[in-house]
Image (cartoon, helix red, strand yellow):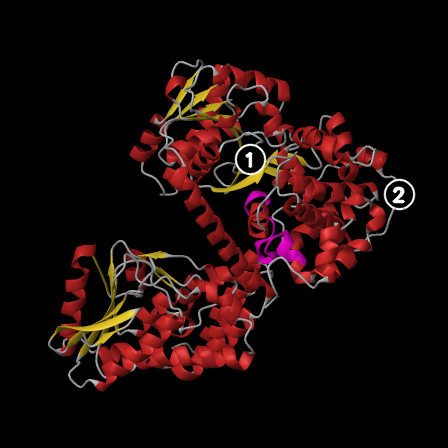
Amino acid sequence: MIYEGKAITVKTLESGVVELKFDLKGESVNKFNSLTINELRQAIDIIKADASVRGVIVSSGKDVFVVGADITAFTSNFKLPYAELKADYLYANKIFSDFEDLKMPTVAAINGTALGGGLEICLAADFRVMSATAKIGLPEVKLGIHPGFGGTVRLPRLIGADNAMAWITTGKENSAIDALKMGAVDSVVVPDKLANAALNLIKSAINGEFDYKAKRQPKLEKLKLNAIEQMMSFETTKGFIVGKIGTNYPAPIEVIKTIQKSANCGRDKALEVESAGFIKLSKTFVAQSLIGLFLNDQTLKKKIKVYNKTAKDVNLAAILGAGIMGGGIAYQSASKGTPILIKDINQRSIEHSLAVASKLLVNCVNQGHMTASKMAEVLNNIRPTLSYGDFGHVDLVVEAIVEHLQVKQDVLIEVEAQVKDDTILASNTSTISISLLAKALRRPENFVGMHFFNPVHMMPLVEVIRGEKSSKLAIATTVAYAKKMGKSPIVVNDCPGFLVNRILFSYFGGFAKLVSAGVDFVRIDSIMEKFGWPMGPAYLMDVVGIDTCYHSQHIMAKSLSSRTKDGRRSAIDVLYEAKRLGQKNSKGFYAYEADKKNKQKKVSDLSVYELLATIIYEQCEVSDDNVINWMMIPLCLETVRCLEDGIVETAAEADMGLIYGIGFPSFRGGALRYIDSIGVAKFVALADQYANLGQLYHPTAKLREMAENGQSFFGSAL
């Protein structure tokens, strides 16, 4: 052994050939933390000083190659002064460059996922051999930053600027075949041939069969594009990116600017340009938010692992209630490997559910995500039934029938008599109290809420609701089943609307006040979409269903009426009474027509303004900023109340619920991080300016206390 550290070892494979292996002790994956960086420095210095070394193979001792930087360290690192942060990244880049400049050929043997810094060390090698099952990519833009270890420098010089910009601005993971076609790697082999392929390649390079210096040289020089080619490439890509994602996410545009600025530079100067762009992005709130989301997601995954330890297996599930939601849940369960029964009293409803599932599967096949044989297997795992005949074998039942207390209780009583004593019953209710529904059951400890969001196949969140008598086993089993379905479950305590809908209807409450003040709903939608929401509140209500919103607000108003209802008729009331139910009957705030792909397209319908005129109680001039505040303050304050009331356990889970459940703008990090971005004290002062609008705008006593003490939900900002 030439060198042995806690993250890296160097040993001789054959005369003149050494293997530099990443194998971070105590971790399931390799990553570039400070330990790894420092040991890489030491290992390279030892290799440089050893005259007997004629070639280096870089490998991994784990199933993955290197997953990238240690993201958990970003929060503290990015708070460093500019000069200190720049020095750190130039130090790391010097190590990568010294590896690239070794007086001998180098080969990276990519056995598994190589992302971020993991791919960047491979790009610094002369040759890259890749396992057919491995994937590579530079996903930094998903964290609001761009590559910082030479990715914007070496990749464009290796595969061309246009291809590199496509890889980096999307942050996607690329298959071995795509990487080979692009020229990012030199060969692809089956996994068990990787070590031999790398060894044969390094020996061929040592013997002069491959000119490693010629292979290395383009990465040290400026980009081979003339001025006109540069202008066309970079400016066209900028326009495309802005048109596709707007300006709320600065990292993709900064990627292009960084590559453009360094196009006429050699490697070392280009790396300085990259570091400047990286540090600029690292200081933005968008980076702080997206990194926070990543860390929040890691927190959720750790909690799920804890639940998995005590969960029982769900080998057969069932859905009560066909339709769009039932079909979506059935598809999700069956496609992830859990067979499911789908029961209804109406054959046509069952056929509709099967059609929903079939359409989703056909789309998967058409998009190349699934084979036809796999589709047939999934469909065979969805078994329609009009009876309870096979329910004696079911491990978990999801009730997804009409949102009506008595009807749900009657059906739950019925199914409880048909299943095993330890079968978990879960209600997909969006608003009705789980504890109240459980009062009808003989085994309330086996009953939980399992709230899916529509469309099921697209929305990642599942709220698992703990009723007063829900057992730990029932909660753990439901969480594990949701995870197995490919969802991100969050456990919340019982209350009207639970977590997400309780907060959402406070947001809708702000919208109702704006409409009643004479503000055009189309303008409100436009402002909130520019703020970052995927759709404005009026459009969202049409998608959810005006009837669903109407019934849900009345259920939640029984306990939240002091905040959500002011006694006057609202926009939801008048649209519901006019039977304008949204997309489901093609009339809501907007009208809906089928486009060329037979998808519903919203169009203007002036007749709705006559209805809304009846609930305009005062005409106000409201600026765009005030529109945002009227909408966002109630949402944020209700999130605070949910955390204080113990509906959700942590600030991380509260924010992730909003990101995953209703599309809260991810670059803003969630409601509580949004408060932090303003500053708790400033947010409280802002809310107080709107106190005359009602209790939705009144900060809690605890939030005022946080403001006085200079506290925040996620610690100090970057």
Dot 1 amino acid type: Ile
Magenta residue span:
660-675
Count of marks, rendered view: 2
Quadrant showing the N terminus: bottom left
Dot 2 amino acid type: Glu
In the image, 444 versus 260, the foreground residue is 444
Position of residue 428 measured from the top left corner of the image (x, y, whole percent): 54, 30
In the rendered image, which residue does mark 1 sit on?
Answer: 465
The label shown at residue 618 is 2
Say if the magenta span includes residue 578: no
Position of residue 176 measured from the top left corner of the image (x, y, whole percent): 29, 57
Res. 715 image quadrant? bottom right
Res. 271 image quadrant? bottom left
Q: Residues within 10 Å of mark 2 (few under 14, many from 20)?
A: few
In the image, 16 versus 309, the foreground residue is 309
Position of residue 500 measured from the top left corner of the image (x, y, whole percent): 61, 41
Position of residue 525 measured from the top left corner of the image (x, y, whole percent): 70, 47
Quadrant showing the C terminus: bottom right
